[in-house]
Structure formats: structure tokens, C-alpha cells
Amino acid sequence: MNRSRWASRAHYGQEVSRSEPVYYTERVRVPFSYWAIALFFGLTFVTAVTFMLGDAVLIASTLTATALIAWTLIGWGAQTITVDGSGVQVGRSRLDWPYVGRATAVDVEQRRRVLARDDVFLALRPYITGVVVVGVSDRADPHLCWMVSSRHPDELVDAIERNRPANGAETAAQSALDSGA
């Protein structure tokens, strides 16, 4: 995939200045139930290791398993969704306003239809039922749209549509997602 062609429009992995006003922000965190399940299985593993290797490894294996679980779940729950004056950012990926297409909260059937495509940027979490699809109006971008998990999908859609720059209305209408591409 040739990212150099569109990297100036959709920024992946780049820190962006926060001098722009922030209209919406949401941190997608892992729920408590995932922590409980992961710790249960992790400590079950520690018990099995201790039974096999003896009590000498109990403390080391407990600390290692707990640290690995915490590192994984904190990293998985570090996704932040931000709508600001320069565009939409999900995690480390940014889509500038001229390339932000129409945003729509989707139901399960629409989600399945979009997921069937292989040209969709996914920022989904299985523990969140709300999903927003943001069209990409840049023909050079290999992604048709962004599919983003959100606990408040209607608020996210409203923030995108309400804060779109005045000249962004026509680019929203030109998204490849809406044309059936």
C-alpha cells in the first residue's frame, strides 16, 4: 500500500497540535468485566504454573501475568476520539476537514454491510455497541470510510456535522461511501 500519496491528508501516527478548539472527545475504555475476566484467567494460569514449578515462581509469575494483562487492557482501551477545529482524530489517525465525508450512526445491518468491504478503516471495540461510519471524500485515500466504535454515536455524529467548516458541506456530499463505490 502506497501511503506517501495520501499521508498529507490523513495523518497516521503523527502528533497534531492541540491549538484548535475541541468540540467532542471520548476515551473508549475497557469495561470492568473485561478486567475481571482477564485477571481470573491470568491468575488461573499462575496457579497452574505454580502447581507445575513450585512456590518459588509464585510471586514472579503473578506479577508478570498481572502486568501483562494490565498492559494489554490499558493499551486496548487507549483509543480516543476527538473532533476539533482541524478534523476528526481516532487514536493516532487523523482525517482533516476537507476529507471528512458524511457521518452516520449505523445499526447492526448497516454495520455488517460496511464490514463486508476490505477498504474500511476500522476502529472497533467488541464491548461497544454504538458505531459511527465517517465517509472519506479523498479519492487518493485507500479507505472508503472510517468505522468507529462510540458509546455516544449520536453525539459524535452531531459534533462532526455541526462543526464541519462552511466549505465542507460539498465534500461531505462527495464521499465515495455515498456514491456506492
Image: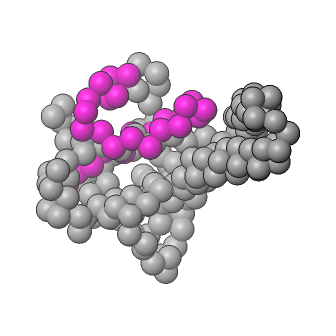
Residue visible at 85% across and 39% down?
A: 55
Q: Which residues are magenta?
A: 112-138
- Furthest residue to the right? 55
Q: Is residue 94 left or right of residue 36?
A: left
Residue visible at 32% across and 64% down?
A: 11
Q: Is residue 89 left or right of residue 138?
A: right
In the rendered image, the vertical position of residue 3 relative to residue 119, given as above or below: below
- Furthest residue to the top? 109
Q: Quadrant of the C terminus?
A: top left
Task: Give yes or no for residue 72 being in the magenta stretch.
Answer: no
Q: Looking at this view, is 9 or 60 the one in front?
A: 60
Q: Looking at this view, is 11 or 52 the one in front?
A: 52
Q: Quadrant of residue 69?
A: top right
Report if residue 9 is visible in the image. Answer: yes
Q: Is residue 41 left or right of residue 158?
A: right
Whole-percent x, y for residue 124 in the image? 47, 38
Colour scheme: one colour
Report if residue 44 is visible in the image. Answer: no
Whole-percent x, y for residue 20 in the image? 47, 76
Residue visible at 48% across and 60% down?
A: 83
Whole-percent x, y for residue 49 in the image? 73, 33
